[in-house]
Amino acid sequence: MNNKQSVFGEIGLLAIAVIFLVVVSLSNVLLRGMRVDLTENNLYTLSDGTINILGDIQEPLNIYFFFSDQATSDIPQLRTYAGRVRETLQELSQHADGKLRITVIDPLPFSEQEDRAAQYGLQGISLGAGGDSVYFGIAATNSIGDEEIIPFLDPNKETFLEYDLARLIYTLSNPERPVVGLISSLPMTAGFDPQTQQMRQPWIITSQIQQLFELRSLGTSIGEIAEDIDVLMVVHPKNLTPRTLYAIDQFIIGGGHTLLFVDPFSETDFPIPDPTNPAAAAMASRASNLDPLFSTWGISINSKEIIADDRYALAVNGPDQRPVRHLGLIGIPAEKLDQSDVITSGLSSLNFGFSGYISVAEDAAVSVTPLVQSSDLASPVPAAMLGFMNDPAALRNGFAPTGENYTLAARVTGKVSTAFPDGPPDSAGADEVTRGKSHLSDADMPITVVVFADTDLLTDRLWAQVQMLFGQQLVTAFSGNGTLILNAVENMAGSSDLISVRGRDKFTRPFTRVEDLRREAENAFRVTEERLQQELTETEQTLNALQTGRQDSNTLIITAEQGAELERFQAERLRIRKELRQVRRNLDKDIEALGTMLRVVNIGLMPVVVAAIGLSLFLIRQRQRRRKAR
């Protein structure tokens, strides 16, 4: 009987092995080329914007993925993420119709591949004394020799992997430098300063934009915005003419990508002094706004109020040169920056100065996604307080936080109507505005606009220090303002498809059910432990009371009553500790049961499901062939 059972057992194992091989073979044949993304957040499904960018590639691009495979054999985190990168590159190649050539390279130490990685500018990361440098980056080229790189694929930026790759591909497919048009009433560019009678230097942020883009100053009195402007940057639009407002309106309505910086109090807006009335300049408004456009969209920025924030206030020197926290100068940490947006992701801090705030009407035609917010210890205060304020502590007079988080910068999207429903404004040059163009009443597509309620964040003093070294400017950034603006311009300079590619969820995800089980057990453990501690405290108090109430002088000898109390406590402590061990044991049992169920599903059930799907598709194809044969 035992021999028969042994034979049947061996036959059963052999049958299972044969079935497994058949299922795998059928799956490889019948499901070849089929891709089904069953992840919760569609990690392996490219966004529509990325697919459109891949479809617009005009000529083949070469993408070289440099990954130190051997040097990372004992670094599972990097190897897991490297697999994710490979899979994403393969998915991109699937949709590029053969115009993406993916090459994976392992740059071994002292090899030509390592020299090649260094020539591209990829960063080799050292893993310690004596260890080989690890390369984990991407270089890409087009047919005319342009190069784009991702120096190091940071696993912490996994959510933006698709965006970074899509941006790289888009940049190589469109090699011309984007054009940034600047409308600003502030002295951001180089020029002659009539007040100092000297040439002024451009702001640092202006110089950095010029290094990466073609910056074109448009002035503040224009009739139209050229079609080759990729990004319009409007800074402190103060006292703009109706025709300039109309030109901005039509650019946005027509799908133009725009960055708007308005401010209730701009530090660098110095009104022209009047010798006959010196006080007039101090009383003049330093506010700017775009109310005609904003009111049409359904948003507003109060030009008479700034945000004061007691939690994020920066320290400055007071009148007596002692440090004082300035409620109007705000240092905003990462927790109040939208880490899911490419513009603000990865930034650790931003400095805003005398910022306004964005309000949204209930019936707004747009959706507003906050990028930067204040803390809950913030409140609007009158901007007029800043006119003659010598002591920053004066902002605390009557200050009362509202508990609300105010939006200081935001993405604004939606299909909107023009702020000029009757057509171009009746002013000199109106014909010039409409020359060769028709009036746009409504946006065909959602507008692409980012609004900042502050202009001082652009100024040098709020984010960077400049030193001269051997005739060269050395810029040291102490805040992320510069990176914020460059991120915004770069993002908006791309196509609408690129802008639509947002952050994705992470590939590596926690076992939430296991964490829930552990959290429940720890809560139960903590409650039991607290009860033990409480009983221990009560027992000590009882023992102390018995000791204090003794009438004899032999305080070192334990009485019968005290001994009984100690024995009771020890017995109770043993019982409670058993309860604690049982809580831990139940936790392990629950987690093991969950693990067993997952193994059964993954190892046993999923192959059966895949085989059933493959067999069904095979039968369907067979029927279709038979029908065609008839």
Image (spheres, grey):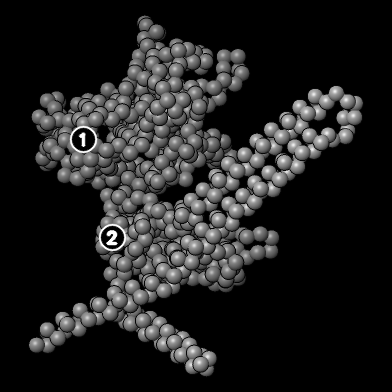
Report which quarter residue 43 is drawn in. bottom left
Look at the numbered disc 1 and give the secondary structure of its residue: loop
Nearer to us in this view, 45 or 37: 37
Mark 2 / mark 1, whichever is N-terminal: 2
| Label 2–label 1 contact, CB within 8 A | no
In the image, taking residue 447 as reference, residue 629 lies left or right, namely left
Q: Residue at x 19, y 37 (%)?
A: 416
- Quadrant of the image for the C terminus? bottom left
Which residue does the numbered mark 1 point to in the structure image? 365
Crowding at mark 1 (Cα within 10 Å: few <14, some 14-19, many 20+): some
The mark lying in front, picked from 2 and 1, is: 1
Q: What is the total number of numbered labels drawn onto the structure image?
A: 2
Say if residue 248 shows up in the picture.
yes
Which residue does the numbered mark 2 point to in the structure image? 51
Q: Which amino acid does label 1 sit on?
A: Ala
Q: Position of residue 85 (x, y in %)?
A: 44, 63
Crowding at mark 2 (Cα within 10 Å: few <14, some 14-19, many 20+): some
Q: Using the image, determine if residue 185 lies above or below residue 6.
A: above
Q: Which residue is drawn at 40% across and 53% down?
A: 505
Q: Extreme front residue here?
A: 560
Q: What residue type is labelled 2?
A: Ile
In the image, taking residue 158 as reference, residue 34 lies left or right, namely left
